């Protein structure tokens, strides 16, 4: 893939949105103001109905006893993020300010260009799978933020995996790949996917034999590696070279991060402010890709239940990693659902309402059972009202 020019990246966004509208898949539709409407129609004295009462933000910067002073917020969010109010991040928690997503570096030479071209062709080639039906791109689709729109991915012979296909916007910048970080490089990751019985179900040797047998690939192999009979390691190196060129489309959030917050409407601006402050999201979703690339337990491990997934612990067997999953990038998140490692949420408003309640809690007493996954100390109940939850969702929609 050649370096995407700005207009080309914009064109991709337009095509993308059109496709999302055309497909109209239920999982991808996010109702405007869904939580306000739900709260207004909920039975009195239920948790949902209580969200209708405006939150008291009197003690907060630009806060009012009922809601927010938008003119004040507009004045605070001028210029680029380094000049904005400091985000609410817990003491000692590593975080990084937002910034532009790094551009794809221009290929250093013809070899690098050929590695990317070959890698792209391999990424889209179902011939790498055992029966020739499943490509990387089957589960990593550009219009779904390089996920596949399913709660759990489906590989060859329709075998269902136990996790959702990850969107790939964080992958070019991550040192530990997969939800549990078990792959130390994009090359190791690609080998895992080709061999995984729930993905491409193949041997590396058979995948390589297929690749080497394609006349058009051999020309690229010659330029990329100096010989047409490339090795298994060179094959996955080419795939990794392509994955490193994957970038999220440019969105309104990029305009805001570049200093043009005037392009955001009130709801989007409030959502951004809440994300950085009251809603505490910056504790983990920071930096240009909106991820700390670290591992956290949100209480979604289904510990001791049938669909238990202990996440990073299963890769390290270190009790400190129980129930932890890698923070996903939130770039393009509105198109990436259903969300979480297991596709638990088909709706973003529903997901935010659970964050608001302090997320899930697994049964069990850590004093009695050392394997009960402890929830991250950065996850707390948030006391957002319905209008604030709606604003947060509007912000997520433009990432
Ligand atoms: C059957 C669906 C499927 C296929 C085919 C597939 N993947 Fe994936 N991919 C997944 C799932 C599921 C995960 C998460 C798995 C986990 O965390 O255990 C994943 C994770 C990844 C990640 C990690 C992203 C990150 O940020 O850690 C990368 C990169 C990736 N896949 C690239 C590829 C490539 C390259 C191929 C082809 C060689 C491929 N995938 C084939 C389903 C698939
Ligand atoms: C303690 C760190 C932490 C905090 C704080 C946090 N998140 Fe997350 N977030 C994660 C992790 C880890 C996951 C993946 C969890 C899983 O799959 O089990 C995640 C997943 C998500 C997802 C799903 C993305 C996807 O592709 O599946 C969304 C949306 C999200 N977070 C938004 C938010 C918002 C909005 C806030 C603030 C209200 C927030 N997060 C606060 C760590 C955090």
Image (cartoon, rainbow, N blue to C red):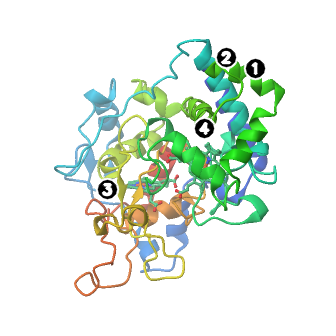
Q: Position of residue 161 (x, y in %)?
A: 63, 64
Say whether disc 2 or disc 4 marks the residue closer to the N-terminus: 2
Q: Is residue 69 above or below residue 312?
A: above
| Disc 1: CA contacts within 10 A as few (<14), some (14-19) or many (>=20) | some
Q: Is residue 1 visible?
A: no
Secondary element type, mark 4: helix
Mark 4 and mark 3: span between their CA atoms?
56 Å
Q: Quadrant of the N terminus?
A: top right
Mark 2 and mark 4: span between their CA atoms?
16 Å
* Residue 259 placement: quadrant: top left
Residue of label 1: 219
Q: Position of residue 242 (x, y in %)?
A: 61, 31
Q: Position of residue 143 (x, y in %)?
A: 68, 41
Residue of label 3: 66
Residue 223: image tag? 2
Residue 302: image tag? none
Secondary element type, mark 1: helix
| Disc 3: CA contacts within 10 A as few (<14), some (14-19) or many (>=20) | few
* Label pair 1/3, CB-CB below 8 angstroms: no
Secondary element type, mark 2: helix
* Label pair 2/1, CB-CB below 8 angstroms: yes
Q: Which residue is depicted at the point 52% across and 32% down?
A: 252
Q: How many marks?
A: 4
């Amino acid at each position: 893939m050649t370096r995407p020019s700005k207009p080309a990246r914009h064109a991709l966004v337009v095509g993308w949105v059109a496709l999302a509208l055309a497909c109209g898949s239920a999982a991808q539709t996010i109702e405007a103001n869904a939580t306000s409407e739900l709260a207004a129609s909920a039975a009195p004295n239920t948790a949902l109905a209580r969200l209708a009462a405006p939150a008291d933000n009197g003690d907060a910067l630009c806060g009012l006893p009922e809601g927010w002073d938008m003119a004040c917020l507009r004045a605070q969010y001028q210029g680029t993020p380094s000049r904005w109010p400091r985000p609410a991040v817990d003491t000692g928690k590593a975080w990084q300010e937002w910034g532009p997503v790094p551009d794809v570096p221009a290929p250093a030479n013809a070899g690098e260009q050929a590695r990317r071209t070959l890698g792209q062709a391999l990424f889209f080639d179902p011939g790498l799978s055992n029966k020739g039906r499943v490509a990387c791109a089957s589960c990593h689709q550009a219009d779904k933020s390089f996920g596949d729109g399913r709660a759990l991915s489906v590989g060859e012979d329709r075998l269902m995996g136990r996790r959702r296909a990850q969107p790939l916007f964080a992958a070019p910048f991550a040192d530990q790949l997969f939800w549990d970080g078990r792959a130390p490089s994009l090359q190791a990751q690609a080998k895992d996917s080709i061999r995984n019985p729930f993905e491409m179900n193949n041997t590396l040797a058979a995948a390589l034999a297929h690749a080497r047998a394609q006349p058009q690939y051999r020309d690229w192999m010659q330029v990329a590696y100096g010989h047409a009979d490339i090795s298994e390691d060179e094959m996955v190196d080419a795939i990794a070279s392509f994955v490193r060129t994957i970038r999220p489309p440019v969105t309104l959030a990029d305009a805001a991060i570049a200093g043009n917050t005037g392009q955001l409407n009130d709801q989007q601006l409030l959502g951004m402010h809440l994300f950085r402050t009251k809603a505490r999201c910056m504790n983990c979703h920071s930096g240009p890709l909106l991820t700390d690339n670290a591992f956290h337990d949100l209480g979604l491990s289904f510990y001791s239940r049938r669909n238990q997934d202990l996440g990073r612990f299963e890769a390290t067997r270190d009790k400190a990693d129980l129930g932890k999953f890698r923070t996903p990038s939130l770039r393009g998140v509105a198109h990436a659902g259903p969300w979480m490692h297991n596709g638990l949420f088909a709706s973003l408003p529903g997901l935010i309402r659970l964050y608001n309640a302090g997320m899930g809690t697994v049964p069990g007493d850590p004093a009695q059972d050392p394997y009960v996954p402890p929830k991250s100390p950065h996850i707390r109940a948030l006391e957002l009202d319905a209008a604030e939850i709606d604003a947060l969702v509007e912000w997520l929609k433009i990432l």
